[in-house]
């Protein structure tokens, strides 16, 4: 017995070691760029998962999208990557072309939850590049109008604008100078406006508005072979002219605003064009100070409805640890079915079960955005997306937008310059 | 323990005698800095030079493209914009920061009440993070509701489209930069001023020198090393301006405030063209080296001239 005891002890250790190896905690690195209140909501969701799944812990890292991708590129160049990386569908191509993302077709084929019939088709089709699925969708967003109900009532306006003419007409009534005069009134002073009718992001994101209005005329931007600009410069100029006139002819939109959300909340602008992600802040203001807001669909200024859109999705970087892939997918499947909490972020749900839930239907302000979802137009998901569309860099889009909106440059000339620049970028292999 | 008797030697003899003996101690003190310098500065610089001859896209194998990136620079209108803006920015900010820094240092070097408070007030902005400064001044310079325009309008002046006009945006960045960093130059100048022996001023005053004479013949010559240092640092910093621009205008409107370092960042990290980005970084490096060499020569000539 004395001889057997140590042997048993060693055996027990071995067995014990085996058990503890099975109990080993897998940590999934999950990166996202939600720096607003939506970040807190995603943290809560992850915390819930972590409590329910002690063996698979998800470590959520949040930083702004642009530096987030810097970090992704930097870590990938060192041969490492997070297990799950959130992004927007239009940003995938550049990373796919560099071989930084893995396809998800096989995962989807084997999944009971992440299946086409469970999702909004608009969202589903966004996840493909060259016929291969590269991401699992989380939500969608489109622009819409938020308006200050009190200022509307004060001006005697009953409904938000649905067309370009209505926007200008209503806009005049909602714009006031220091003497309470409206544009068009005698003695109106455009240099001393204290309340603007609308903010359409007339600075960095002005080309998002252009994108909506250009697509309302049915325009193409990039040639089918992806090698040149296919912009219809006449249509482009018409879209820009409408936006430029809002600022310089009708004086109902500011030349550029530092914090459009703050100016809307403080009543300096009566309408704000933005995405549903503003809803949590607006709801908070309603609770705190009775801020009376409502939302309306993006107006149709030209022939057909079309609106700038985006969304979030989950990609699986190819340099992530392959051993953790199964656990990462498990988490994403759970997230797809359990993201009711994400509804609070304002972003539009695309998992049909959630879309049809009573909880979502009772939420304020979402209808106007859901209505426009079928008309969502994404910026092109092309490898050189950033070189053409980055809004914090001197891209052809930003330069065109700022010259036209901030400098009152000629829309037709600037459209042609931008188109030439786009061709210049695309023609280089 | 026996102490060996030691022959008395003069300093020079001792130095000559020990010259061949390697003394490791000082190198140990330098080592921590040297480590970080090599890993985070020297290494990446050399790597960057190598990358500038490739088409590296952050991942994958870089391909040698020879001088293609440098040739591309010659026909890149954005790079021309960035070079021009950086040059204008430096030409305006460097004199402003030197003159204002020196003036503030002279003013706050006098034995007057409120001196300490003044120094703190001027220096404090420098310790604020650049992104915070950027956001703060973006609000202050807002065209319609910013405090700066509000102040201007109380003097009967019109609204200045600070950050939303090509003509004004760079000036907006210059103003912010001066407010943010002038305190640093002031502190360096203050240190330099306090090194000047008071006896020199007393002697000159007895000889009948007026304050302009004191400034020209005592302050300026004795402050020359500090002035040189501050000039170098200010030029290098202004050529590397990035964070304020990125936060306040992202290089806009159009390309009106695009600077070299922002363009390097954009080309590398946003467009994933690390080869071309590195080539521009090499260009910036060459520009700064030329400046440093010219300045050092001018300084030495100035010194030998003074002697």
Image (tube, coloured by chain):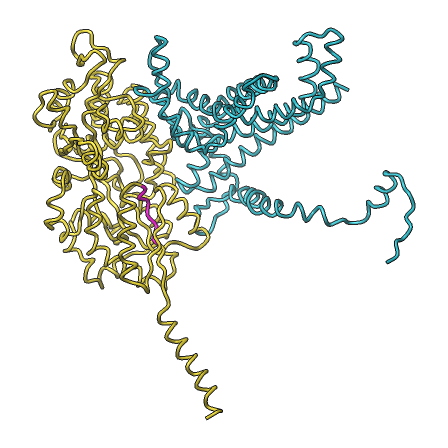
Chain colours: A yellow, B cyan
How many discs mark residues in the rendered view? 0
Percent position of residue A160, x then y: 11, 28
The x, y position of residue A398, in whole percent, is 32, 30
Q: Residue B184's x, y, as percent? A: 55, 27
- In percent of the image, x 37 and y 68: which residue is there? A24
State which quarter of the image contains the C terminus of chain A.
top left
Residue at the image point whose x is 12% and y is 40% from the top: A367
Residue closest to the far left: A158
Q: Is residue A369 above or below residue B60?
A: above
Name the side, left or right, on which A60 lies relative to B232. Answer: left
In the picture, measured across the screen, residue A224 lies left or right of residue B100, that is left
Range of residues picked out in magenta: A30-35
Vertical comparison of B199 with B249: above or below: above
| Left or right of A125 on screen, residue B37 | right
Looking at the figure, which quarter contains the N terminus of chain A? bottom left
Occupied quadrant, residue A214: top left
Q: Is B153 in front, or is A162?
A: B153
């Amino acid at each position: 017995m004395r001889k057997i005891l140590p042997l048993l002890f060693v055996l027990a250790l071995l067995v014990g070691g085996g058990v503890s190896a099975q109990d080993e905690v897998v940590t999934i690195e999950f990166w996202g760029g939600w720096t607003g209140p939506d970040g807190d909501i995603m943290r809560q969701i992850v915390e819930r998962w972590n409590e329910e799944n002690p063996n698979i812990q998800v470590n959520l890292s949040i930083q702004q999208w642009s530096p987030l991708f810097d970090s992704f590129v930097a870590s990938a160049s060192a041969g490492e990557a997070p297990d799950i990386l959130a992004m927007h569908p239009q940003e995938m191509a550049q990373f796919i072309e560099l071989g930084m993302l893995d396809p998800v077709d096989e995962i989807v084929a084997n999944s009971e939850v992440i299946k086409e019939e469970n999702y909004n088709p608009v969202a589903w089709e966004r996840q493909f590049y060259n016929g291969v699925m590269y991401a699992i969708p989380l939500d969608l967003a489109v622009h819409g109008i938020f308006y200050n109900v009190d200022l509307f009532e004060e001006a005697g306006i009953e409904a938000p604008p649905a067309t370009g003419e209505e926007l200008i007409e209503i806009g005049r009534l909602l714009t006031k100078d220091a003497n309470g005069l409206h544009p068009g009134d005698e003695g109106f002073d455009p240099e001393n406006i204290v309340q603007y009718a609308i903010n359409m992001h007339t600075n960095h994101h002005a080309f998002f508005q252009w994108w909506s209005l250009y697509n309302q005329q049915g325009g193409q931007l990039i040639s089918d072979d992806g090698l040149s600009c296919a912009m219809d410069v006449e249509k482009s100029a018409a879209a820009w002219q409408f936006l430029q006139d809002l600022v310089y002819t009708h004086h109902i939109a500011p030349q550029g605003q530092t914090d459009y959300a703050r100016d809307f909340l403080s009543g300096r602008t009566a309408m704000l064009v933005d995405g549903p992600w503003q809803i949590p802040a607006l709801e908070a203001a309603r609770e705190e100070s009775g801020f009376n807001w409502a939302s309306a669909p993006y107006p149709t200024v030209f022939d057909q409805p079309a609106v700038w859109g985006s969304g979030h999705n989950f990609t699986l970087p190819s340099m992530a640890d392959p051993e953790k892939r199964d656990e990462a997918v498990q988490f994403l499947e759970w997230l797809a079915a359990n993201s009711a909490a994400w509804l609070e972020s304002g972003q539009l749900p695309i998992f049909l079960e959630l879309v049809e839930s009573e909880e979502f239907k009772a939420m304020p302000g979402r209808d106007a955005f859901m209505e426009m979802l079928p008309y969502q137009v994404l910026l092109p998901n092309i490898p050189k997306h950033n070189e053409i569309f980055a809004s914090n860099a001197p891209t052809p889009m930003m330069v065109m937008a700022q010259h036209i909106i901030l400098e009152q440059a000629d829309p037709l000339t600037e459209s042609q310059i931008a188109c030439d620049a786009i061709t210049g970028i695309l023609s280089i292999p | 323990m026996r102490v060996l008797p030691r022959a008395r030697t003069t300093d020079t003899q001792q130095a000559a005698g020990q010259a061949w003996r390697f003394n490791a101690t000082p190198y140990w003190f330098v080592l921590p800095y040297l480590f970080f310098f090599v890993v985070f500065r020297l290494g990446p610089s050399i790597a960057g030079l190598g990358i500038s001859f490739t088409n590296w896209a952050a991942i994958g194998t870089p391909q040698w493209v020879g001088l293609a990136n440098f040739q591309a620079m010659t026909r890149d209108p954005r790079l021309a914009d960035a070079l021009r803006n950086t040059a204008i920015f430096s030409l305006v900010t460097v004199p402003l920061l030197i003159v204002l820094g020196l003036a503030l240092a002279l003013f706050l070097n006098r034995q007057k009440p409120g001196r300490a408070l003044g120094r703190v007030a001027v220096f404090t902005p420098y310790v604020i993070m650049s992104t915070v400064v950027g956001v703060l001044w973006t609000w202050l310079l807002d065209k319609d509701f910013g405090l700066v325009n509000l102040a201007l309008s109380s003097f009967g002046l019109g609204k200045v489209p600070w950050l939303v006009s090509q003509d004004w945006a760079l000036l907006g960045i210059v103003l912010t930069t001066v407010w943010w960093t002038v305190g640093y130059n002031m502190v360096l100048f203050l240190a330099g001023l306090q090194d000047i022996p008071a006896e020199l001023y007393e002697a000159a005053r007895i000889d009948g020198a007026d304050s302009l004479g004191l400034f020209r013949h005592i302050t300026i010559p004795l402050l020359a090393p500090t002035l040189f240092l501050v000039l170098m640092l200010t030029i290098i910093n202004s050529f590397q301006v990035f964070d304020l621009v990125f936060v306040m205008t992202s290089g806009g409107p159009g390309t009106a405030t695009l600077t070299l370092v922002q363009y390097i960042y954009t080309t590398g990290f946003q467009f994933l063209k690390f080869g071309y980005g590195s080539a521009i970084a090499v260009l910036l490096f060459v520009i700064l080296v030329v400046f440093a060499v010219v300045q050092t020569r001018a300084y030495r000539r100035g010194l030998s001239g003074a002697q």
